[in-house]
Image: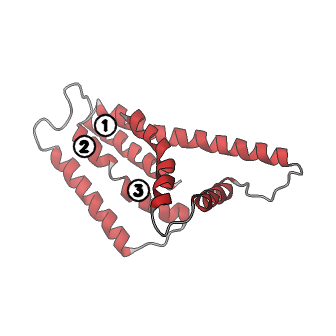
Amino acid sequence: MAYLTHSGHLVLLPLHLLTSAFLPGQAPIHEQLNVLRGVLRHRFRKSDTHSTSSSGRTRRAWTARLAWTGIKLSVLSAVPSCGWYLASSLTSMTAITSIFNSFAFWAYLLSIKMLGEPPSAFKLGSVVLSTVGVLVISLGGAAVEGSVAPAGGSSPLVGDLLALGASLSFAYYEVW
């Protein structure tokens, strides 16, 4: 199922461009692509000035940086999934889902630290309310018979910690 979900991302940009072509007030497709190209150039440029003299070396460096970033994103997107699957044999699916969905809290904290986003009382309140809901569901579910661990589960605490690690790594992936 994850394959289908992630493969669906391949059609998002073409679908967006197609729909925006028919919506009034939207920039033409070539302008949208130019903006995207500029964002990619900005994101993947070297931190130092362009010290290479030939355009071929600059293109190779840009391609290598793009490939390296793709590898990092692949790993960063795979780690949360691995944590989820490892936790599924150790604790209940309710606990995994609720703990994993606390990533909004961690993403908010990381965005303040990594992106320099100014803290907002409204955003913090929203994220704290969401996290309290996660805690109520996951900790409250432990009191319900049969929700502590699945039949083959051996350690709900380890499973919950794996789910928390997956949540943290997904938050890092979302902010990075």
Image position of 55 (left or right of 128)? right
Image position of 129 (left or right of 33)? left
- Which of the two discs, 2 and 1, labels the residue nearer the N terminus? 2
Q: Amino acid type of disc 1?
A: Gly
Q: Residue at x 45, y 63 (%)?
A: 23
Q: Amino acid type of disc 3?
A: Trp
Across and down, in percent, residue 128 comes to 31, 64
Q: Helix or strand or loop: what does disc 2 sit on?
A: helix
- Do labels 2 and 1 touch, CB within 8 Å? yes
The local crowd at label 1, few if under 14, some if 14 to 19, many if 20 or more residues have their Cα within 10 Å, is many
Q: Helix or strand or loop: what does disc 3 sit on?
A: helix
Residue 8's disc number: none
- Which of the two discs, 3 and 2, labels the residue nearer the N terminus? 2
- Which of the two discs, 1 and 3, labels the residue nearer the N terminus? 3
* Residue linked to disc 1: 159
The local crowd at label 2, few if under 14, some if 14 to 19, many if 20 or more residues have their Cα within 10 Å, is many
* Residue linked to disc 3: 106
- Calculate the distance from the C-alpha at mark 2 to the C-alpha at mark 1: 9 Å
* Residue linked to disc 2: 95
Residue at the extreme bottom of the image, as rendered: 121
